[in-house]
Image (tube, rainbow, N blue to C red):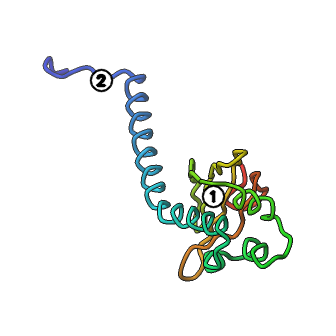
Amino acid sequence: MDDDALPPAPMAHRLLGLAAIVAVVGGVAYGFAQYRAQPETDMALAFLNEVRQEAPTARTRAAGDALAVLDGQPGESSPGLNAARDSRSFQAVHTHVQWGARCIEVHAYGTTRYTLFVEVLEEAEEFRVTRVVTMPTHNGPCAPD
C-alpha cells in the first residue's frame, strides 16, 4: 500500500454524500417544476378573479365541470365557484404538478377564508381550469398522494 494514499472513506460518509446529492437534485427538480407551473398559476388566479367579478371572459379559461357550472348547471365546482364569488382576494399557496395537469391550492379571502383546489389540465393548445373544489378530489391532480 502506498504511504501517501488516503484510507477509503467510511461507508457512513459515502451514504451522507449520496443523500446530499439526491436532496439537491430533488430540490432543483421541484423548483423547476414550480417555475414551469407559474403561468398556469397566474391563469388560475385570473380565472378566479373573473369568476368573482362575473366577467364573461372566465368562460374562455374554463372547461369540463367548471365550464358547466359557469353555464348555470350544477356540478362539483359549484361550492368552489360560490366561494370565489364571495371572496375579495386570492393567494396561491401551493402547486402540485403532474404530467399535463396542475392542482393549485388557493386561499380565498373574504368574510370567511376558504381553501380552494383549482384543477388545471393541459388541452391541445393551452391550459384550462376544469374544476374548482373546496376539498381534494379522489381523482385527478388534486387527489391526495
- Residue 48 vertical placement versus 124 (above, below): above
Q: Nearer the viewer, residue 10 or 136?
A: 136
**Residue 60 picture quarter:** bottom right
Left or right, 84 with reference to 12: right
**Residue 12 picture quarter:** top left
Camera-nearest label, 2 or 1: 1
- Amino acid type at image mark 2: Pro
Indicate the position of residue 103 as horizontal and vertical percent values.
Answer: 63, 58
How many labels sit on residues?
A: 2
**Residue 101 picture quarter:** bottom right
- Amino acid type at image mark 1: Cys
Of mark 2 and mark 1, the one earlier in the sequence is 2
Residue, x 61% and y 69% (percent of image)?
Answer: 50
Indicate the position of residue 10 as horizontal and vertical percent values.
Answer: 37, 21
- Residue 126 vertical placement versus 117 (above, below): below
Label 2 residue SS: loop
- Position of the N terminus, as image quadrant, is top left
Residue, x 68% and y 71% (percent of image)?
Answer: 54
Residue, x 78% and y 64% (percent of image)?
Answer: 77
Residue pointed to by mark 1 = 103
**The label number, if any, that marks residue 8 in the structure image:** 2
